[in-house]
Image (cartoon, coloured by chain):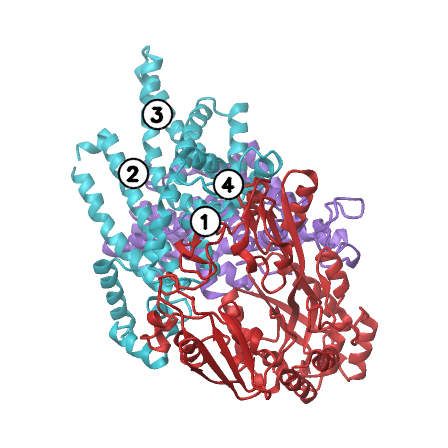
Amino acid sequence: MPDAATSWRSTPDGLHWTVDLRHDLRFSDGVPLTSKDVVFTWQAALDPATGYPYRGQFFYIKKVTAEGPYRVRFDLSSRNALFVLGALNVPILPEHILGRIPHARIRATDFGERPVGSGPYVLESWKHDENLTFVPNPHWFGGTPTVKRMIFQIVLNDQARTDAMEQGVADVDDAIPPSAYQILQADDKSGRANVLLLHIPDLYTIFIQINFHRPGLGDLAVRRAMMYGWDRKAMVDGYFRGDEQLATSITPAGLRRWYDPNVMQYPYDPARANALLDAAGYRRGPDGVRRKGGVRLAYTLDLQGNGGAGQDFGAEFQADMKAIGIAISIRTLDYATWVERTNAGEYALAYGGWGGTPDPDELTFLGCDQASPIGNNMSYYCDPRMDRVLEAGLKTLNYAKRRALYDRMQQIYAEDVPDLYLYYDYYRAAVSRRVHFDVKTALPGQYLWRDVQHWQLGPL
Amino acid sequence: MTRAVLRRFLRHPPGVAGAAIVIALVVGVGVGPILLGLSPTAIDHAVLGYAQPPSARHLLGTDLLGRDVLARALDGGRVSIGIGFTAMLVAVVVGTLYGAISGAAGGIVDAVMMRIVDALFSFPTFFLIITVEALTNQFALGMIVLILGLLSWMGVARLVRAEVLSLRDRDFVEAARALGVSQARLILRHLVPNSLAPVIVAATLAIGDNILAEAGLSYLGLGVQPPTPSWGNMLQDALLPAARNSPWLVLTPGLLIVITLVAFALCGDGLRAAIDVAAEQSAPPAAQSEAA
Amino acid sequence: MAYILRRLLGAIPLLFIVSVISYALMGLAPGGPTAIFATQTRRMSPAARAEFIHALGLDKPWYVQYFYWLKNLVLHGSLGYSYVDNRPVIAKILERLPVTIEMLSLALLFTVLIALPIGIYSAIKRNSVFDYAATVLAFASYGMPVFWLGIILIDAFAVQLRWFPTSGANSIGGEGNPTDRLYHLVLPVATLTIVSLAAWIRYQRGAMLNVLGELYLRTARAKGLTEGRVIFGHALRNALLPTITLLGLSLPGLFSGAYFIEYVFSIPGMGYLGINAVFQRDYPTVMALTMLTAVLVILGNLAADVAYGLADPRIRYD
């Protein structure tokens, strides 16, 4: 929305924001975009009946009202540092199309097939599982984008996408896997392909999620032992070919203004892991698995997808854990089931990740009151120290003060080990050299498309 | 008669070759791992992520986690062949009973039962197998065996029914009926044992088919779940992008599957040659066209 | 004629049984048939959902449900909506049907063209080196897992030699170009052909051997000179007839193989849709595809039977 908004300001207490809209905004069907569309969007978003998946993040927004056709007022229940970044980036829905539909039915309409938006491009056609074609939006306020036609081709086969880039048939390959990146890198050097490669630290932390409700996993000694007993560095350097960055805490290195590496470290040390578990009273049984009281350290690791890389990963983790007396069995679930189970707490350990926002806040993920399904705390982790830091962090608007708070957050996270954090990922993309665009606009969080209206096509 | 069959079988070189390979494979996967003393699960942290080519220490190289490929291939062979064989047993038991009952009952019951078999035959078997696996999410070895077996018994049923139909009007059956033998006893004690000849051939080939099905199933992640190795899920590993320049990973399980299947097929062919001749001497021609 | 009619009528109970089996399979899915054909209820509130289910009669016992489902199918041609994108399953499947049929037909054509001569020659030169070699090759091709062969061919001919594309049915921007399509289908069709050869070679060899056996007996009895070529032609025709029945028998396997190959080569056909649907647990699509394939197989068998009836003079006088 910062594109659509000309200015925004808040009262000194940070509880009331006023946002001014441009006067020349139009939807792709020509209807003007005004404050009533913004109000409608927020009414729908904040209504639980709609089922907006990110509703939890906007818990602090109390009311949204229109003050004239080009001004919107947001009333917050508490100050929040994420208002501009989060709330003002929510896309605006057309009230004249969706206004009459009951909120519960909005997601069931086919608006998604023929969306009406107000950006530089509009969807011309969507051939399912094949391609989507975008053409310039004639009513966009910014004029006419340079590139007159954009076709997004859906190619599920990784190799085919790489081939297309090599042959010059495709211009952009977005979010490519490390293997494809390596191939194209070699190609560019050898002259076989003419592509510009982007390799930017991304905003996701990949980890093995822990369910604190499972016997044994709520015990700090067990979690720390797992960190010491898991050869994470060898996995990142070897298995992931050194193309990801070993994680030190929850905040990814890509968030350069916030990342703090000065936290408790967990070098690979199985002897120490064993000592920790021994000291905590977990004795090995005849089957080699540790137990204490009625608790046996045996867990299932849920992997996503249909085998492949995940299996090897699981096997390595399983072997490392076996060496310290923890039995791991591996289960692979299809993506939808994996999400369902982890959201419902029906898991012990799950290999996944979190992140994506260009802000270090993690309240919905780590807060005591944010247990899933209310928030996104799927671990059921709770530490009052963490809560204090996170809540203060959201209410603080001064960078230096916030920085100190989030440094503390990263330290507490490393001490508590709510998840077995593994690496920070990279964003990789390949763009044909015939596309001229400003590389500096490809920042984490917005990647290539931030400035798409200014792209130029030229010779290679 | 068994001795005559055996003699005829031994005169057929391809069949003998097949049988020899099968025996070698079974012995290999059975005791090989113990004799070799190599661990299929030992992960080598030093080479994580880089599959090692064959060397003196690892005769068939290692996979992406540094595990010895030969050891895994033998272990996997035990699983794959084991599943293939056991699933065949399930199919044979179910199919034989079904076919015998259908043939012995005759009339409408027979017609309906055979129509059901025809309908089941129309489904694309492998796709049906992965569908059932995905629907039930049961990947324990026993369940895989059950699912494979329960979706492949139809061929055996047809064969047994054909045999039973031809036996039904024979003298010894008439005699048994005259003596007041119950239907069930008739089926189990007399009809089934005499129908088994073509079933043995079909069973041999079925083992091969099951191994192929397991390979495809495990490759898709819907079969044997790692870390338990099977030839199918070794192929899953072998086809990751990181395993790109490691042909030994793809060729080992694949060639083993091909060799195993060729062996079973040659064996089955030899058995068919040996048994058919014997069958020709005792069954009327009508039975043959039904079986074809 | 009566033969053809009888065959047609015989297919009807088959189709009925196929529908019952498919319906029963849906029972294996979590939520059962109700969940599958009430796809739209997934995003509804519990009250709205109960109402919807009652309106469709899905809360009745399973045998009643079956008839509702059948009615829905026959009257509206509807097989439910996909979990993935809520589009009618039938539409998604029909979009993909042409590519699969194309691939299957080509593979079948080449299989027959290659396998029949080899089978026949093997029978004539029984137990010769050619026969043994053909046998081993046939078994080897049968023993190769179809996906393994596909991947090896891709690696050899597409990645290393760059003679063919690695995947897809068209180049980006090449839709509608038949040459481009054929170029993309070379490797997949080759894979499917190779694994199908074995059955046809062996079957043809067996059929030819049968006929030759009869032939020698007859000529021995005739004790006269016979025109080699005339008898040979007669033998050939009789040997080819049973092959038509193999066509019908091999259809299920051919479909299974084609589906797997589509997945390996990323060819947007029914199999690609089906296998991805299995991974996504898109039960409505999976069930519909399974059932439709069985129907196609039955129709294929019917066509083969009719062809056999027309070709075999013995049957005409029935």
Q: Is residue A366 left or right of residue C126?
A: right
Marks 2/3: CA–CA distance: 25 Å
Question: Residue placed at 39% from the left, 73% from the top?
Answer: C43
Of residues A99 and A56, the one nearer the viewer is A99
Q: Are marks 3 and 4 in contact (CB under 8 Å)?
A: no
Q: Secondary structure at mark 1?
A: loop
Residue wearing tag 4: B268
Residue wearing tag 3: C214
Q: Position of residue C172 (x, y in %)?
A: 48, 43
Residue wearing tag 2: C304
The chain that appears red in the image is A
The chain holding disc 1 is: A
Q: Are marks 1 and 3 in contact (CB under 8 Å)?
A: no
Query: Pointer 1: residues within 10 angstroms few (<14), some, or many (20+)?
Result: few
Dividing the picture into quadrants, the one containing residue C246 is top left
Q: Secondary structure at mark 2?
A: helix
Name the amino acid, label 1. Answer: Arg
Q: Are marks 2 and 3 in contact (CB under 8 Å)?
A: no
Of residues B41 and A55, the one nearer the viewer is A55
Give the mark nearest the N terminus, 2 or 3. 3
Residue wearing tag 1: A149
Marks 2/1: CA–CA distance: 49 Å
Q: Position of residue A236 (x, y in %)?
A: 73, 61
Q: Is residue B43 above or below residue B279?
A: below
Marks 1/3: CA–CA distance: 70 Å
Q: Secondary structure at mark 3?
A: helix
